[in-house]
Amino acid sequence: MHHRTKKHHYYMRSLILLGFSLVLAHLLWTGSITFYLAPRLHSLCYVTFVILLLLTGSSFWQIRQAKNQSEVIKC
């Protein structure tokens, strides 16, 4: 079993959140979100996008603030 540091875990989580944010941004920017959601839900989609951006920023901030890089977690 591979051992990974917390910082590696934060990197992976940040990249996944960034990917979801970019997919949602692309759907909103091109207007193709209407193929997946009813127009009534578009405002909630923008709220979700802002929340995803905040979570992504928070996750990248955790990478920056990771003090104990040698602490190991088991997967």
Image: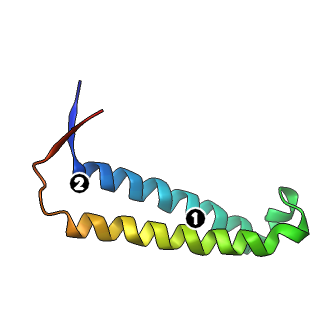
Tally the numbered discs.
2
Question: In the structure shown, which secondary structural element does the residue marked by tag 1 occupy?
Answer: helix
User: Which residue is depicted at the point 42% across and 56% down?
Assistant: 15
What residue type is disc 1 on?
A: Leu
Is 69 left, or right, of 60 in this rendering? left
Q: Position of residue 72 (x, y in %)?
A: 16, 42
User: Which residue is depicted at the point 65% across and 64% down?
Assistant: 24
> Between 50 and 23, which is closer to the camera in this rendering?
50
Question: In the structure shown, which secondary structural element does the residue marked by tag 2 occupy?
Answer: helix
In this view, 11 is above or below 63: above
Q: Badge 1: how crowded within 10 Å, few (<14), some, or many (20+)?
A: some
Label of residue 1 in the image: none
Q: Position of residue 52 (x, y in %)?
A: 55, 67
Q: Please say which color scheme the image uses.
A: rainbow
Task: State the image quarter where residue 34 is shown.
Answer: bottom right
Q: CA distance from mark 1 to mark 2?
A: 22 Å
Q: Which residue is mark 1?
A: 22
In this view, 66 is above or below 46: above
User: Which residue is depicted at the point 72% across and 65% down?
Assistant: 27
Is 42 left, or right, of 64 in this rendering? right
Q: Position of residue 6 (x, y in %)?
A: 23, 50
> Between 14 and 47, which is closer to the camera in this rendering?
47
Quadrant the N terminus occupies: top left
Q: Position of residue 28 (x, y in %)?
A: 73, 71
User: Which residue is depicted at the point 31% across and 71% down?
Assistant: 61
What residue type is disc 2 on?
A: Lys
Q: Which residue is mark 2?
A: 7
Earlier in the chain: of badge 1 and badge 2, it is 2
Q: Are marks 1 and 2 in contact (CB under 8 Å)?
A: no
